[in-house]
Amino acid sequence: MISILKQLSKHWITCIVIFILLVIQANCDLSIPSMTSDIVDTGIQMSGITSNVPDTIRKDSLDALLWLMEEDDAQKVMDAYSLKEDIYTLVCEKNKTLEQAFTIPEMVLVSMASNNKEEVQVKDLDEACKNLLLSIQSFPAGMKDSQIREVLQSTMNSQLSKMDESTLDLMESQAKAFVKLEYRAQGIEQKVQLSYLFKVGSKMLGYTLLLVACAILVGLLASRVSAFIGKDLREKVFEKVLSFSNEEIESFSTASLITRTTNDIQQVQMVYVMLLRMVLYAPILGIGGIVKVWNTGSDLSWIIVLTVGMLLGLIALLMVIAMPKFKKVQTLVDHVNQVSREILTGVMPIRAFSREEYEEKRFDKANTELMKNQLFTTRTMAFMMPFMTIIMNGCSLLIVWFGAKSMDMGNMQVGDLIAYITYTMQIVMSFMMIAMVSIMLPRASVAFSRIEEVLNKPLSIQSADKPVEKEFKGEIQFSDVSFTYPDGQDEALTHLNFTMKPGQTTAIVGSTGCGKSTILNLICRFYDVSKGSILLDGVDIRSIPLDQLRDCIGYVGQKGILFSGSIASNIKFGSDISDEKMKEAGQIAQAEEFILSKSEQYNSHIAQSGTNVSGGQKQRISIARAIAKDPLIYLFDDSFSALDFKTDATLRKELSKKTKDKTVLIVAQRISTILHADQILVLDEGRIVGMGNHRELMKSCKEYQEIARSQLSMSELGGIE
């Protein structure tokens, strides 16, 4: 997991931007429920009245309120309003002082107007104000205003003493109820309500649009970061695999390397998107939701604790059950890819030997094992969602049940309950997001560890720390060379000593598996010698930079590998040459005959692996590719086997003109191909049992004689017995 996170360090600026966007998104997400609560509690129930200080108030209503206020408060209120046509209009900003001055008088008037009624009407309020003003007029004429207020204060205190605790807790809402009735009496209640709803609704819409914009930007940036990391990983894996020697290639199967480069990196990419979009967002949303719930001051917090505890228990159980299976998925995918590749590569011999049914069973076995594993993990995930839904719905039920009781007691309003449920669902959803990702993380972790196995694989073939760079002529010397394959026990080559000089053609013959191709692999440093050394112009090839060494070599393998593209692109594959030199190489390789017969000639299409050309045509294009490079050293690994004798002879004749000052090494099974070689090495079980030209070996080497006489007649051998 730490290794996965390290990849994000290269994109730290983008990650910071994503974090800021997620904080903004979470803030918008957490603000919307409180706005919903405001719309329900204030916009609908209180007709959009947010303060108990009225913007406008009738003269009789304000006069009644002023008599219920302290003298100082009454003066402050009078200073805050101006009178016009029996309507007082607020001329200053609303503040705490004004709210405190209005609260108790408004509540007392509403209480007087209610007279134990379920709903107070405007006429009830007007009657209460009228009665209050009439009672003031009934006081003795010589009585001072302060004395009248003392009497009223005494009456008001007695009125308050009759109210129970729950009524006192609703003092503010009672005060707002007064303002609501006052606006209704003035005919502006609906206007105030619509204004408030439009204001809060517009704010909600703005927050929603900002939330959507942040979510889109986060998705875009997260996908971009993920794509760049995936691209970077693919490039690193590909570059590392290209630097592998045969030893490293063989330690990973080809199917596994393909899976690691494609499927594994795809898994890691998906996790990066989820990390940046969900894992990073979930704690922000969850913590924010907990803070919001805590600020509500509700006594329902135990429901959230219970819900979160159940979710964590469910996640832990699923991790224990599903984790081993998720870790096994990638290995099974490797196996299916390997079997598929073997079957598709060998489809012709499978048909020839009627082994379709056997191979179908073999593939079905690997495929079924993968299916069972995936079914188990999918079913586990399928069980998780219903259980989480049950927990969420149970949580909602508990909140509604106990929230209704709180509402009945007057401790909570409808909007607060709605907001509380929404915040709780957001907290639960944040844990659900973490749960979903926690199931996928193990698989991604396994995938990333498999990618790291490739990236951290030590290279057995590397350039020397202090490489020798010089101009080379092409002389190769094997000095007491022995070699054992990495997984082998017996030596493939034993104490080889020979020299190949520029201007000479050296050939190697021998029975199958005697080590002919291994010699070419050692010269190219596909493997390094186990003992001894290979020298190029007196310099150990291990001291020569790999790119410089291989620039000196034109290698043609046994299979004649071609790449998808055109004939021209394949011939020019090893060097940047002109069309004239490309055509010259095609002529020397005797490939022009079939190339010119094609409608597009050198631009003719070559399918992947050269499946649309014959074996002989593949070999001739491969030989042309090596000739076009014009190297110091030519290595032909049984590269003439698919050619007919006439083409073989013509090609070698033309090739000898091109390579008269080059070092040429030919591995061949046909004696006719190497008959005129300057030096022939005869190998038997990794040892040189004969060395010389054809005539010398026919006299001195029994093994060579057996090979030669099994292929050519006496006349073809030059009459040598």
Image (tube, rainbow, N blue to C red):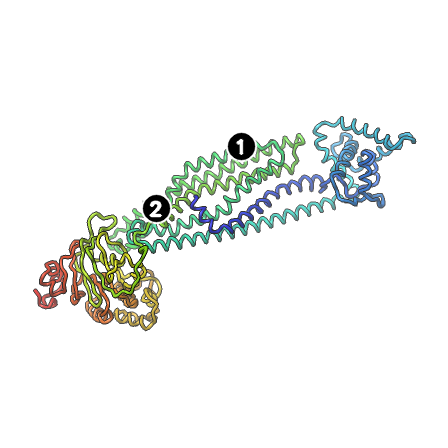
Q: Secondary structure at mark 2?
A: helix
For disc 2, the neighbor class at 10 Å (few under 14, some 14 to 19, many from 20) is some
Q: Which residue is mark 2?
A: 367
Does residue 616 appear anywhere in the picture?
A: no
Between 637 and 61, the one lying in front of the other is 637
Residue 261, horizontal then vertical, whole percent: 38, 52
Q: Position of residue 134 (x, y in %)?
A: 87, 33
SS class, disc 1 = helix
Mark toward the start of the polypeptide (2 vs 1) = 1
x%, y% of residue 2? 43, 44
Are the residues flagged by discs 2 and 1 in contact, CB closer than 8 Å? no
Amino acid at circle 2: Asn
Q: What percent of the width, then of the height, locates residue 618?
A: 28, 64
**Viewer-proximal residue, 47 or 121?**
47
Is residue 433 shown left or right of residue 675?
Answer: right
Q: Nearer the viewer, residue 300 or 282?
A: 282
Quarter of image, res 29: top right
Question: Is any part of residue 80 visible from this angle?
Answer: yes
**Res 442 quadrant in image:** top left
Quadrant of the frame with the C terminus:
bottom left
Q: CA distance from mark 2 to mark 1?
A: 43 Å
Dot 1, crowdedness within 10 Å: few (<14), some or many (≥20)? few
Q: Which numbered tag is attached to residue 573?
A: none
In the image, what residue occupies the spot 46% across and 37% down? 315
- The residue tagged 1 is 306
Q: Name the quadrant of the N terminus.
A: top left
